[in-house]
Image (cartoon, rainbow, N blue to C red):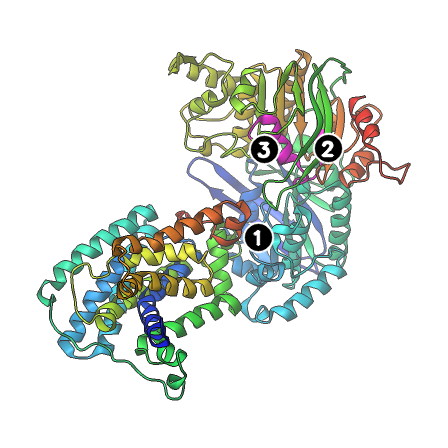
């Protein structure tokens, strides 16, 4: 492999890893607060279709991105109303959200299938873009890639240094104690769920506006699920989410690379790699009772009944 | 108020009704500045409701609270903290995956907790000043129960506290730790902070408190000065009748071994557990062996190994002519063993299942099955017998386990095992959270079981209880077992020092294994 090929592969890796990164970041925050939202795929699809329709109709890409996020938030509010407000089973609610989102996005987007759109264009960052290898890989991407990395840094700082970040962690570990301390458990969980929705919507909009600027039914192709397993793969650590997103991104373009090199490996087989990796990580994690206790949010997925 | 200095907190006519019960009925309480005030009462007497009202967790239906003479309402814990009320819950509200400093920061107003380094220094200062040293940078999951309690108290102390509410603070401490806690509390009270000390341990109330308010069935049944009132009188106020407190039972000596542990060793299962080191003991038929120790010193591990929840390798557990090491709980129960775990919900009972079904779960010796099919009638009868004999308060045998109060469920779980007449009963904290009357019932049943020839191991943190019912006592400390000695001739201090890991006062050299075994087998 020559240097140019490597650069191209890495470039594609960052690109295809970005929607995973966005969605997984949202889900990490959500899960750290103790809420398991399996509706990522549905929220992404709604984000993708809404973003596309708005951009297509107005010709304004930024507006499309914002609309995609808003659609994600709207979906997450639906989830929150059921799972937090009515304390429905989170797993069932999340699955329903995915199915609902897939159906609704297909319905809303019928008229827009195959319509052309000029996607978000790359933005070269002066000076940095000229660094060999690193420049093309990281600094000749589109603005959403930079935004994703900035959000990553913000989330990391949030958990590392801020009091609300501490609150989210505490609430995810033990909502009863948090209530006793007077921490607003439900408010924090609502915000976390909505952040998750916004990120999923953004991830979806990235697909339909930047990655492949078009709308097709079910275009997320399981990325929501990959993002979910990515959270576990990263064992809820922010830094590892980035690593995982890029790794999974690499895995998803690997069949192209290998085909280019004359190997014939089924792309379906390669597509299973992220899930395989997640299973391996899960096994390693749960082989040690204390490790899972230290990393996984203890109250994850359990409805919280504030007692009066 | 006519008095020159108004009370720190005074409440009058506090009434709180829940759908089924009146938890507080016209309750009055008056705590002066710098006073250590005891709130006494059995379980379900309304102590926790009152304390939740004072801390703003619950709002009363009627009633008025005065703070420093001014009428106030306390709608939330935040408001309570703002007034200067701090609370240490019985179940600590700590987060295991966070450090001491982070935990404390979460309980403080945001502006005080912004700089964590500065906060860590303050924690260190305050903790040392009050004789409760903690390391601010440690993760909470690495701390002992006593240390965790200190964090809770320090968290309150950092907030300019003027009333500290402690809910059964001594139940998790060794006698020595209790002494240190009392020392710190007296220092705090001398500086003008009022303390509300919730307990049912009467002698502790006598040594520490200046005033006591006794609750019974939600109403105040009396006020007294615990320093001049006898424990018997206070107990009468609590229970309402002349219940004999700390009834003594005849001690027996027995020498027919039933279960023997030989150099039992076990690695901890998770890093927050304890390794068991070389535990040797014998329980004889017709005796109660008490195992003292502060929670987290290997009790859980020992219980799991005895029950079969965890298997051991080798030949370390001998029961009659059987080696139990590789036998699962069901097989052990078929041999006549019964176990009462410490955790009532989850280990002792399935929360969502009815009492009858929970009775079936361990009813191996009762013939509740017919070739694998349920005998509904027999199952209900068995549950009803337990409910009757142990006066379990429940609407029906179908009531879900988690709908019962802790004390009632405990009575049911203990009763379920005792009524099966096991040959060996292992029970952890048999009367934890149970009122005096029910504790007496349970104790009597245990003694009766003993007198019928069963061997009983009681693992408990409550030394009074152990002295009351055990025939021999040993203590666990950091996974090691102290010598086991007959209760007759043994004093509280001796067991206290065992619990602290001092197994031999006369010789400073480490004791030899043979010696320990000899003691254990004696």
Residue A141 appearing in the image = yes
- Same chain for labels 2 and 1? Say yes or no: yes
Q: Which mark is residue A223?
A: none
Q: Chain of mark 3?
A: B
Q: Quadrant of residue B259?
A: top right
Q: Which numbered disc, 2 or 1, marks the residue that appears first in the sequence? A: 1
Counting from the top left corner in percent of width and height, residue B316 is at: 67, 25
Q: Which numbered disc, 2 or 3, marks the residue that appears first in the sequence? A: 2
In this rendering, is residue B277 above or below A92?
A: above
B326 with respect to B404 (left or right): right
In what element is the residue under mark 1?
loop
Q: Which mark is residue B342?
A: 3
Q: Chain of mark 1?
A: B
Magenta span contains residue B300: yes
Q: Which residues are magenta?
A: B291-309
Q: Which residue is tagged 2?
A: B278
Question: Which residue is depicted at the point 37% across and 59% down?
Answer: A27
Q: CA separation, marks 2 and 1?
A: 33 Å
Neighbor class of circle 1 (other Cα within 10 Å; few <14, some 14-19, many 20+) is many
A244 with respect to B363 (left or right): left
In what element is the residue under mark 3?
loop
B370 with respect to A79 (left or right): right
- Relative depth, front residue between B177 and A30: A30
- Same chain for labels 2 and 3? Say yes or no: yes
């Amino acid at each position: 492999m020559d240097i140019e090929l490597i650069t191209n592969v890495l470039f594609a890796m960052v690109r295809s890893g970005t929607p995973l990164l966005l969605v997984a970041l949202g889900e990490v925050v959500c899960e750290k607060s103790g809420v398991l939202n399996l509706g990522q795929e549905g929220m992404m699809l709604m984000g993708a279709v809404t973003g596309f329709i708005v951009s297509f109709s107005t010709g304004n890409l930024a507006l499309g991105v914002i609309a995609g996020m808003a659609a994600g938030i709207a979906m997450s509010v639906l989830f929150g109303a059921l799972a937090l407000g009515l304390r429905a089973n989170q797993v069932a609610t999340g699955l329903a959200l995915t199915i609902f989102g897939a159906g609704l996005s297909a319905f809303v987007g019928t008229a827009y299938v195959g319509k052309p759109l000029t996607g978000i264009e790359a933005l070269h960052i002066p000076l940095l873009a000229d660094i060999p290898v690193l420049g093309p890989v990281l600094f000749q991407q589109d603005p959403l890639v930079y935004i994703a990395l900035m959000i990553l840094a913000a989330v990391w700082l949030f958990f590392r240094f801020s009091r609300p970040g501490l609150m989210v962690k505490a609430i995810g570990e033990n909502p009863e104690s948090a209530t006793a301390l007077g921490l607003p458990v439900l408010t924090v969980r609502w915000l976390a769920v909505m952040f998750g929705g916004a990120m999923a919507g953004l991830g979806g909009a990235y697909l339909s506006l930047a990655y492949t600027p078009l709308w097709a039914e079910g275009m997320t192709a399981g990325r929501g699920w990959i993002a979910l397993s990515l959270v576990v793969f990263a064992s809820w650590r922010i830094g590892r989410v980035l690593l995982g997103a890029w790794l999974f991104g690499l895995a998803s373009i690997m069949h192209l690379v290998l085909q280019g090199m004359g190997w014939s490996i089924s792309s379906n087989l390669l597509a299973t790699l992220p899930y395989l990796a997640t299973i391996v990580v899960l096994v390693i994690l749960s082989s040690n009772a204390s490790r899972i206790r230290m990393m996984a949010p203890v109250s994850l997925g359990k409805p919280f009944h504030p007692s009066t | 108020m006519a008095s020159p200095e108004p009370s720190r907190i005074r409440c009058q006519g506090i009434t709180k009704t829940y759908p089924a019960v009146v938890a507080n009925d016209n309750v009055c309480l008056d705590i002066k500045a710098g006073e250590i005030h005891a709130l006494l009462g059995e379980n379900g007497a309304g102590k926790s409701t009152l304390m939740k009202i004072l801390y703003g967790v619950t709002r009363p239906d009627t009633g008025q609270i005065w703070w420093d003479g001014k009428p106030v309402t306390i709608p939330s814990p935040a408001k309570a903290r703002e007034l200067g009320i701090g609370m240490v819950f019985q179940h600590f509200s700590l987060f295991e995956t966070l450090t001491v400093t982070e935990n404390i920061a979460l309980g403080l107003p945001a502006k005080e907790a912004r700089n964590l380094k500065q906060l860590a220094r303050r924690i260190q200062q305050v903790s040392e000043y009050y004789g409760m040293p903690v390391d601010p940078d440690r993760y909470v999951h690495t701390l002992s129960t006593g240390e965790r309690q200190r964090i809770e108290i320090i968290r309150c102390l950092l907030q300019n506290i003027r009333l500290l509410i402690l809910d059964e603070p001594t139940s998790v401490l060794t006698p020595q730790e209790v002494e240190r806690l009392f020392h710190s509390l007296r220092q705090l009270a001398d500086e003008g902070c009022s303390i509300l000390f919730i307990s049912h341990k009467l002698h502790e109330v006598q040594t520490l408190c200046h005033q006591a308010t006794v609750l019974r069935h939600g109403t105040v049944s009396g006020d007294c000065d615990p320093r001049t009132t006898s424990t018997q009188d206070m107990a009468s106020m609590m229970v309402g009748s002349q219940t004999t407190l700390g009834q003594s039972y005849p001690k027996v000596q027995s020498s027919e071994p039933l279960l023997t542990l030989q150099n039992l060793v076990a690695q901890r299962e998770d890093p927050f557990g304890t390794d068991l080191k070389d535990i040797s003991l014998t329980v004889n038929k017709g005796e109660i062996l008490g195992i003292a120790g502060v929670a987290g010193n290997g009790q859980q591990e020992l219980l799991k190994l005895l029950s079969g929840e965890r298997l051991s390798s080798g030949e370390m557990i001998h029961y009659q002519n059987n080696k139990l090491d590789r036998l699962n709980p069901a097989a052990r129960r078929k041999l006549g063993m019964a176990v009462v775990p410490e955790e009532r919900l989850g280990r002792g009972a399935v929360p969502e299942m009815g009492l009858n079904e929970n009775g079936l779960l361990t009813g191996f010796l009762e013939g509740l099955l017919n070739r694998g099919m349920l005998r509904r009638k027999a199952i209900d009868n068995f549950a009803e017998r337990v409910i009757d004999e142990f006066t379990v308060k429940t609407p029906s045998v179908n009531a879900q386990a988690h709908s019962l109060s802790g004390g009632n469920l405990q009575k049911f779980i203990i009763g379920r095992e005792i009524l099966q007449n096991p040959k060996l009963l292992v029970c952890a904290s048999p009367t934890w959270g149970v009122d005096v009357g029910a504790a007496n019932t349970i104790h009597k049943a245990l003694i009766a079981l003993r007198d019928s020839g069963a061997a009983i191991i009681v693992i408990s943190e409550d030394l009074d209880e152990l002295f009351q019912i055990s025939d021999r006592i040993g203590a666990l400390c950091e996974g090691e077992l102290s010598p086991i000695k007959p209760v007759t001739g043994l004093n509280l201090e001796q067991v206290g020092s065992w619990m602290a890991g001092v197994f031999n006062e006369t010789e400073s050299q480490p004791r030899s294994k043979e010696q320990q075994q000899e003691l254990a087998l004696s």
